[in-house]
């Protein structure tokens, strides 16, 4: 049942670089007017490990996320980091047991307006033998967090192995994607509508067919904009390299699915894993794991056209090596319009933080504010960054003092 569910877990061998190269690259990084610091190192076991998670931030500046493994039962955690002066206090809010409550929660949690947390776990649950994954909710009452499974997947037409961060609208509806399952076995997009007594009504709003509409919903959170949902299918599309899509609600309560762009393969993008990002003009930005001129990943822009179509342009192609490669993350803007993201590999061998600055004639210039070095520095950022107060916060699956994962703060 779980064949392919661990597609987000990428293990890397240790990469050795010469002392000369390391000193040279660190010198280049040091010229940047930015700082990157590890603010928490996971210890493994009960503390949590393998933090393949986005970071959610509440109005008080608390950080929230998940660890895929570790916790009291070894099946993952949901955690909080609370600022306390110049340090941070880590608290495990919930440890998954690996049974009906779920196991292996990827990509973190989403906050609603009341401070509740929502997320997914790719395994566990009671929907099928061995567990096909769950959508869960964590509610805070007087400092005590209670976990509730609001849907357990069956592995049938509803999907299986949900590994994407969910989206919550102002009415409390929850939206997400699965990479497999559904009528064609290639993933679904679903909605959970809140009802009486804390129950949720589940509905599949799109089933991927593996054809021109795409297949395998990406690990990126869908974006809700003007009542429409936007996201990416990692594979499929007209050329088999993935696609960006839009879902529009109808008066009949259904959703119309539309492909905005099908990636065409190298030198175009290939396999978009992360979430999409809108700018103020309605342009969409994102990254692909493969593709670009060098086949090692790309950053792209989709610009809306008056006739309802979208024009795609590759803004940057990663070169590998010192430059970094294979971005899995979403992107983010700073206050002056620069783009930031991470690559899961390259740099000194443990991934990078990259910056794209808009230049003349629509060109973008890349720079590398930070090259992850591995323990005690962070290592292998498989997720993007979240910004608050002029700083960005992110997670890495490895690195930190114990090489079990880390949370870092990056200030441009």
Image (cartoon, rainbow, N blue to C red):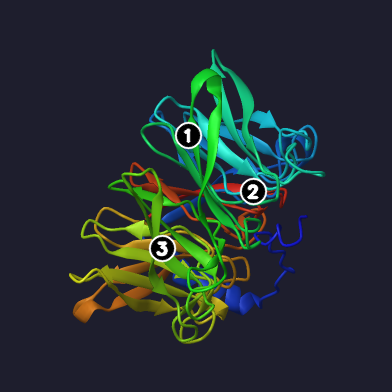
The label nearer to you, 2 versus 3, is 3
Residue situated in front as seen by the camera: 298 or 89: 298
Q: State the image coordinates of residue 232 (x, y, percent, origin top left).
A: 47, 62
Residue situated in front as seen by the camera: 352 or 158: 158
Q: In the rendered view, tell whether residue 300 sits above or below residue 38.
A: below
The label nearer to you, 3 versus 1, is 1
Q: Which residue is mark 1?
A: 193
Sooner in the amino-acid sequence: mark 3 or mark 1: 1
Q: In the rendered view, tell whether residue 43 sits above or below residue 182.
A: above
Q: Secondary structure at mark 2?
A: loop
Q: Is residue 10 left or right of residue 164?
A: right
**Residues at marks 1 and 2, CA–CA distance in whole angstroms:** 29 Å
The label nearer to you, 1 versus 2, is 1
Q: State the image coordinates of residue 159 (x, y, percent, origin top left).
A: 63, 51
Q: In the rendered view, tell whether residue 160 sits above or below residue 102.
A: below
Q: Is residue 157 left or right of residue 224?
A: right
Q: Which residue is mark 2?
A: 51
Q: Residues within 10 Å of mark 1 (few under 14, many from 20)?
A: some
Q: Which residue is mark 3?
A: 245
Q: Is residue 231 left or right of residue 188?
A: left
Q: Residue furthest front?
A: 252
Q: Residue at x 71, y 67 (%)?
A: 12
Sooner in the amino-acid sequence: mark 1 or mark 2: 2
Residue 327 shows up from this direction: no
């Amino acid at each position: 049942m779980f064949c392919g569910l661990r597609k987000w877990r990428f293990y890397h061998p240790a990469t050795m670089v010469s002392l000369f190269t390391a000193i040279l690259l660190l010198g280049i990084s040091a010229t940047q007017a930015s700082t990157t610091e590890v603010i928490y190192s996971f210890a493994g076991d009960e503390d949590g490990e393998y933090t393949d998670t986005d970071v959610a931030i509440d109005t008080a500046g608390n950080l929230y996320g998940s660890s895929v493994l570790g916790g009291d039962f070894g099946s993952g955690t949901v955690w909080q980091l609370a600022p306390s002066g110049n340090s941070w206090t880590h608290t495990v809010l919930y440890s998954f047991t690996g049974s009906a409550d779920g196991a292996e929660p990827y990509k973190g949690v989403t906050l609603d307006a009341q401070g509740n947390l929502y997320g997914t776990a790719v395994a566990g649950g009671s929907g099928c033998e061995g567990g096909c994954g769950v959508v869960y909710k964590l509610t805070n009452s007087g400092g005590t967090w209670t976990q509730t499974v609001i849907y357990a997947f069956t592995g049938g037409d509803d999907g299986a192995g949900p590994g994407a961060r969910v989206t919550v609208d102002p009415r409390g509806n929850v939206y997400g994607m699965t990479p497999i399952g559904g009528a064609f076995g290639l993933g679904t997009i679903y909605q959970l509508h809140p009802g009486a007594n804390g129950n949720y009504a589940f509905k599949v709003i799109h089933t991927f067919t593996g054809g021109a509409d795409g297949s395998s919903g990406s690990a990126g959170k869908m974006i809700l904009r003007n009542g429409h949902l936007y996201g990416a299918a990692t594979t499929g599309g007209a050329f088999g390299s993935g696609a960006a899509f839009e879902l529009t609600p109808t008066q009949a309560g259904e959703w119309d699915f539309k492909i905005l762009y099908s990636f065409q393969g190298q030198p175009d993008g290939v396999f978009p894993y992360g979430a999409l990002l809108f700018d103020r003009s309605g342009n969409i930005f994102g990254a692909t794991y493969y593709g670009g001129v060098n086949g090692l990943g790309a950053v792209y822009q989709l610009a809306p056209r008056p006739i309802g179509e979208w024009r795609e342009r590759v803004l940057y192609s990663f070169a590998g090596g010192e430059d970094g490669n294979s971005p899995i993350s979403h992107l983010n803007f700073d206050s002056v319009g620069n783009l930031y993201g991470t690559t899961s590999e390259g740099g000194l061998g443990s991934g990078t933080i990259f910056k794209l600055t808009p230049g003349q004639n629509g060109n973008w210039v890349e720079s590398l504010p930070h090259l992850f070095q591995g323990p005690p520095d962070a290592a292998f950022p498989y997720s993007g960054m979240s910004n608050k107060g002029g700083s960005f916060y992110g997670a890495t699956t490895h690195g930190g003092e114990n090489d079990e994962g880390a949370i870092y703060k990056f200030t441009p």
